[in-house]
Amino acid sequence: MDLTTLLGIVAGMTLVGTAIQMGGSLRSFIDIPSMMITIGGTIASTFINFRMDDIKNVLRVTKVAFTRRPPQLTSVITQIISLAELARREGLLALDNSLDKVKDDFLRHGLQLVVDGVDAAVIREILETDLDAVGERHKMGRKLFDQMALFAPAFGMIGTLIGLIQMLRNINNPSAIGPGMAVALVTTFYGALLAYLVFIPISGKLAVRASEEALEKEILIEGILAIQSGDNPRIVEEKLRAFLPPATRAKVAYKKGVQPTAAGAAGATVAAGAGDTGTKETAGAKT
């Protein structure tokens, strides 16, 4: 589980709450009608803006921001090198016996196409289409949170206007103007807090996760095609190491005779929230 997302939200809320408490009463910032306007209005607008199926899928994709760790690309490359050695030594059909040991659906799908003798251009087209579909689903998740980040401050302002109208009705009572203004501004506070501490950061985290997953799958595609073409495992290693930062390339070293294991790349790829399409989102399977 990636704790940084949850830790950031909790830390932000805690710091804001502590700052409020140090300057006055935290209770004065708690207003149920303001919450109803800001949170309820944001949710209602989101339902209007998106289809129910999109919202359900986005909720599953959102788990990526809280649960999915960055893929261990060195482990992914190591398994591909091992599979390349197996295919070069015993032939492509030997990969069929190792497919059950590969837990990553995207990699297993590509290897199955190789075993079935599908042309390299067709394999690339199929896998890249799969990759594009995953990217579109992640893009929808980011779009939803970006929209919520627009809706929340807007409804905060609406709540403030409502509060001001109600306050002006009692303008003949000067003692009520100050407290009424404070309550009116609370909705703006709620909207800004939700937008800049929750919605925008989660959208950014989803963008980072999508980029990491895309890189992992690009490595898998190049590795699968290298295996099909019968490249020497050392050549496969050099091709795939190019995707890594220079500081981590030394961690990938070809060792002749290493057999692919069940952990392999799949062990490095945690399912996207265990629910972003039911462990198949990280595999690239279409929902």
Image (tube, grey):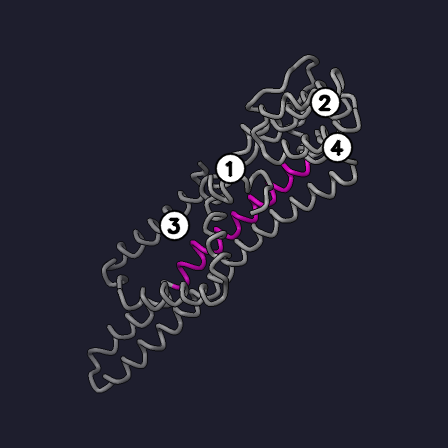
**Does label 4 or label 2 sit earlier along the sequence?**
2
Secondary structure category for the residue under label 3: helix
Secondary structure category for the residue under label 2: helix
Give the label on residue 271, or none: 1
Question: Where residue 87 sits in the image (x, y, percent)?
Answer: 73, 21
Question: Where residue 278 sits in the image (x, y, percent)?
Answer: 49, 41
Q: Amino acid at mark 4?
A: Leu
Give the label on residue 225, or none: 4
Which numbered mark, 3 or 1, is in the foreground of this view?
A: 1
Which numbered mark, 1 or 2, is in the foreground of this view?
A: 2
- Kindly report the distance in space between the C-alpha atoms of the residues bearing marks 2 and 3: 54 Å
Give the label on residue 240, or none: none
Number of residues whose C-alpha sits closer than 10 Å to that of mark 1, classed few (under 14), some (14–19) or many (20 or more): many
Is residue 92 magenta-colored? no
Q: For mark 3, what is the residue?
A: 12
Question: Where residue 159 sits in the image (x, y, percent)?
Answer: 35, 72
Residue lying at the far bottom in this picture: please name it.
172
Q: Is residue 148 above or below residue 59?
A: below
Q: Amino acid at mark 1?
A: Ala
Tell me the magenta residue range: 191-219
